[in-house]
Structure formats: structure tokens, C-alpha cells
Amino acid sequence: MFAYIVRRLLWSVVLLSVLSVVVFSIFYLIPLVGGATPETLAGRYVGRAATPETVHLTAERLGLLDPVPVQYWHWLKGVFVGAEYDYGSGVEHCPAPCLGYSFITKQPVWPELLDRAPVTISLVVGASLIWLIAGVSVGVISALRRGTVFDRGAMGVALAGVSLPIFFTGLIALAFFSYRLRITAPGGTFVPFSESPGRWAYSLLLPWITLAFLFAAQYARLTRAGMLETMTEDYIRTARAKGLPERTVILRHGLRGALTPVLTIFGLDVGLLLGGAVITEKTFSLNGLGKYAYDGIVSNDLPKILGVTLVAGFFVIIANLVVDLLYGVIDPRVRLE
Amino acid sequence: MTTSALRDLVIRHPGQAAQEPFLEVVDLSVHFPTDDGLVKSVDGLSFALDRGRTLGIVGESGSGKSVTSLAIMGLHTRPASEQTRPGAQLSGEIYLEGEDLLAKSPEYVRSLRGKRMAMIFQDPLSAMNPYYTVGHQIIEAYRIHNPVNKKVARKHAIDLLGRVGIPEPSQRIDAYPHQFSGGMRQRAMIAMALSCDPDLLIADEPTTALDVTVQAQILDLIRDLQSEFNSSVILITHDLGVVAELADDVLVMYAGRAMEYGSADQLFNRPAHPYTWGLLGSMPRFDRKKSERLLAIKGTPPSLINVPPGCPFHPRCSYAARNNGRSEEVRPELAPVEPGHTVACHLIQIEREQIWEHEIAPKL
């Protein structure tokens, strides 16, 4: 078991390096294919007023004239030992882990990511708990009351939940609950958990519910389908034949089997969202990783995008690992000897 | 026919007539409404079982054997009670020591399940929950009916596993079903069924999914445990060899109805129904030349939505023509051919005996 975890972690490192090569290539090669020159990139640092000579000099100092593999090597070295950036107004130090140096803010990317991570983590942890509990409960009840008004209603709402985009439900919810009824915090509010857990939850309640609504729908459908399947298993009949109350049959014997696919999707969804719940954060003006990525994209700030992408990739890889390990806990048949 | 009249028809064993049978099924019908029509899985079935005896129920797939056992266990979903499965329409009476289970509340029947009556299923791999250890599942079955702490229940489970012949039970108790072999799983399943010392044990094709060598072991085990626990056993199977091995009485079912009912001795030595003859004829035997073909029953089992009128077996019966059309029109009821031996067939006694003696018996 321990050896397996170590092996998986080593693989994660390999996977991350491959990811970094791919992302690096996309961000630094494709602009060149599209007609950009090293000078265009350097120009992003020095501003519009600079003379062509200055730009060229900056490009040289930043190593943008080097072959791409060499540039990648410099970047990779920066991740471990830090790097120096000289874009004309003196040498700037970017301490390890240096994922890049923003064109716009002229700041290292890593500390900015660290700053924003708590917002995204708070958003995702709260929302995922809500959608998991709500989705699974609704799914179970729907499966057991198949064909009833509850089932049809829940599945109808679920369909709406899957179909409606966050920027729609989010804005409607904000307008109604925050600005008309004034029962939830307005957009852009975030109170760190360490400051006040109560106000933290209050500030995030609406984004949580909005994000959870989108996902809960999917989970309700998945749980319902899983329950309908496991409740026809032979071992459910055995459980009934033992004389177990129906409640125990459902919760202890039925739900357990139905949860396996739910768990897989849950891990991947959480991993994906931790890399930035872009639309939710934008809609509710939360300064998280998603908003950071959005800002990077809008301002063509390649180092920012590279940094966020790598962090997102890291979360997805870790989530996959956690899911695989949890599989063994939830299903003894895949447990490693 | 009234129910009380039907009850009188149920054959009792000689010398036990005054005693109430342990289990008595009277005019049981189990129908499933479907989009294609009403599926009559069991239609007017009656039989009785005394304490300590073993009843073998035989018949082809779809003859209603399992549906009958699930009805006794109260495992069919009634319509409108719950919507996960299509509901079954049950009618008739099922008396367990004089109590009509069909008239009792589902909650009351649940309290009997596992405690008074228990069931062993065909495929122990799918019948055991893969997510829990074997011990957990036995302990769960025990504790639901016995208010004991986990430690006592665990000791009981280890004891049971040992009694059903699982080596090193104190270690194997923590294994998962997939870590057991097929035979071991069925043993564990039996241990689970016996955990509360049930009076009635229903074994639904307990050896079908098992290796032939293991089959014999499991049958021996069921027999030994039956004498140890003095429980009544209903053994559902399509394997006449298994019936010959274990059963005291045999009920032959076809299309949800009883065709023939009697002691194992009567059924094997003086079978009276053409369908039983067919079943016996389709059994492979060592003492027969390989060149001789099995006496297969021609045709296929009828649709349970459109059961043939009259005798449901008549389209496949070689002797139906001898009954002047009665087989096609009149449904035969179980009628005695000798004490304790009833048959649902229009053939007249003399003709039946002649066919058996001259046409069937020599070929078996």
C-alpha cells in the first residue's frame, strides 16, 4: 500500500512535468507560430513607449532570444531555485518556486496564487459538501419513489440545474437574494475563515448554493441511476431475506454500491474546480484562482495563465490519486493486497 | 371452489392428519401486471410441509418455483407500497404454524424473516454484498433479531462458520466474499441463513452455481444441519438428482401450477404425470447406453401471460389426445392416485398405469 502511494506520487511528478512542457509549449511556441516575435513578448514587460532597441535588449536579457528548450530549462530551474528577471528597470528576483513573472503586475506569480488559493478552496469545499449531500439524498429518494411526483419534480429541477449556466443563476440569485431581499452577502465579499468562520460562511453562502445547484443536479441523476441498479442486485434481496428493516437495506446495502461512481466524479469535479471555478468566481467577484486565470487571459498575461494551469493540473492529479485510494476503501474488491 | 374446500384437498401424511402442518400454502397465486399483460407466475398452488421434513420443488425455469419461495418469505413487493419494482398481486393463504402470513403486516413478516424462516440463494457470489466482510453479514443477520453486543455476535458467527465447515473460521470471518471459493461462499451463505436457528429453510437452487464435487458437500451439509437444527427445508431445484438426494416429499410445478405432489419414493418409483415422466426421461444416466437418446420433453414452456387453457401442459403432452378434448378445456385439479400422492392430470387411472408400465418405465 505504501509502495503504491509512493509509486503513484512519483508518477504524478512525471505527469506534472509533461504537463508543464505541454503548457509551456502552447504559451511560448504558438504565439511565435502566429507571427509574434521574442520582441513582442518582451514588449509586454517594457510597455508601449519603449524604442525597438530597448525592446530587443530586454528580450535578450530575459532570454527570449534563446531556443525554446533552453527557455524551458531556465523556467524549470526557476521553479526549483528561483530566477532573476531583468526587464529594463533593474534585476527583479523571483524566489523559488518561480512559476513565472507577470507581465502586468510585474510580480512573481506564485505568491499571487498563494494569496488567492484560500478563496477558491473555501468556495469549492463548501459548495462540494452541499452538492454531495443534497445530490445524493435527492437521488436516493428519487430512486426509491420512482415515478412519483417527487421523482419527476426532482429530476425536472435537476435537468434545469444541469442546463442553466452559473452566470445566469448566479446573477439572478445575487439580484434577488443579495440586493432585493438582502439576506445574503453582496458580490465580492470574502471573509477569511481564520478571521470569522461565521462571516466566512455567510459571505460565501450564495456562491456555494449557486455552484452546488449546478453540480447537485448531476449527482442526483447519477445517484438515482446507481440506486436503481444496485437495488435490483441479488444481495439486496439477501439483505431483505435476513429481515433487515428497509431503511437499513437501502442505506447500508444499496447506497454503498451506488456511491462508487459518484465518488469518482466527485474527486474529479473537486480537483477541477480547485484549479479555479472561473465563472462562479467571476460572477460573484471572488478573487480566487479562477478570477486570476480570467484576468490573465483577458490581459494576455501568459505567465499568470501558465501558473494557474499548472496549479490546476496539480489539483486534478492529486484528486485522481485520492479517488484511486478511496476506491480501495469503498470497494474491497479493488483493495490492494 | 371455496378456500376451505381447497384446504381439505391438501394431502396430509398418514398418521399426521390431525396435526396442523408446519407450513401450509393454500391456493396461492402470484401475478405480475406488466405492459404485455398479466404474468401468472404462480396460479392456484397448494401444498403443505411438516416440521423436520424436506420438500423438493422441481420444475423448469419459469415454472414458479422461486416466485413461490419469495412469496413465502414475503419478499415480493405489493403494488403501491413501493415503486422501485413492479408490484406482485398475491392471493391465497400461507400458514406458518397457523398464522396466515399474507394477512399479516409487512413489518410483522419482516420480523419473521431471518429468524423463523431463512433463505439460501442460488449464486452466493451475487447474493452476498461485496462491500462487507462475510463476518459482518452474518453478524448483521444475527444481531437484527438478537439483542447482543458485537463481541457475542462475532463469537456466534465464528462458531457458525466452523459448523458449516469453513477452516480457521476466526480468521476467515474477516474475509470478503470475493476472497472465498464458490463452495466456501455457499457455506457462508448457509451459516448466515442459520444464524438465528430458523424453523424453515428455503434453499433456492443452492448447488446450481457450484462445481459438481462441491455440490455433494453442500447437500450433505444441508442434510446434516437439518437434522441438527430440526428445521423444515424447502429445496427448489430443477435437478432431480438433488431431489433424490435430499427430499422427503416432492412437488412438481409447471407453468405456476402443481402437476404432481407426493413422497420422493412415490414420485421416483411410481410417477403419475406425463410431465414428471418427461423430467425423469430427460435425466442423463450412467446405466444407459450412450447411443440411446434422452427422452426430451418436446416444445418449450408456455408463456405465463397466455397459459394454455385446460391443462397447461397439453400442447407438449403425448397423451393429451387420449382425453377426448378435456385436456384442452378443463383445468385438472390435484386428485389422489394413492394415499399421499396427488396428480393433476385427466388420464384415467388404468390408462396411466399402463402407459407408465409399458411405455415409460422400460425406457428409463
Image (cartoon, coloured by chain):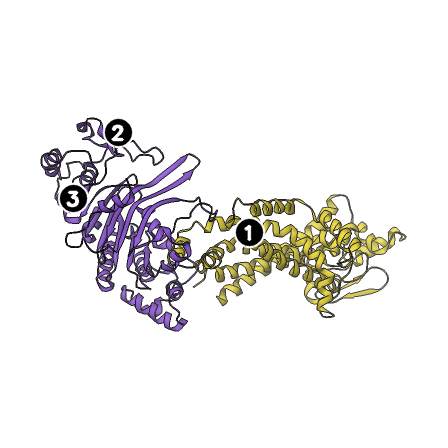
Chain colours: A yellow, B purple
Label 3 resides on the chain identified as B
Q: Which residue is mark 1?
A: A139
Three-letter amino acid code at disc 2?
A: Glu
- Mark 3 near mark 1, Cβ–Cβ under 8 Å? no
User: Residue A17: in sight, yes or no?
Assistant: no
How far across and down, in percent of the image, does residue A261 sit?
Answer: 52, 53
> To which residue does mark 2 refer?
B329
> Which one is nearer the viewer's eye here, A272 or A29?
A272
Quadrant in which residue B309 is drawn: top left
Residue A289, horizontal then vertical, whole percent:
72, 58
Element class at badge 1: helix
Secondary structure of the residue carrying numbered label 2: helix
Chain on which label 2 sits: B
Q: Label 1 crowding class (10 Å Cα cut-off): few <14, some 14-19, many 20+?
A: many
The answer to whether the residues at label 3 and label 2 have Cβ atoms under 8 Å apart is no
At 57% across and 51% down in the image, what residue appears? A220
Dot 2 alpha-carbon crowd within 10 angstroms: few under 14, some 14 to 19, many 20 or more: few
Residue B106 is drawn in which quadrant? bottom left
Residue A138 is left or right of residue B105, and the answer is: right
Give the amino acid type for the residue marked by disc 3 in the picture: Arg
Q: How many marks?
A: 3
Q: Nearer the viewer, residue B49 or B301?
A: B49
Query: Whole-Å distance between the Cαs marked 3 and 2?
Result: 36 Å
The answer to whether dots 3 and 2 both sit on one chain is yes
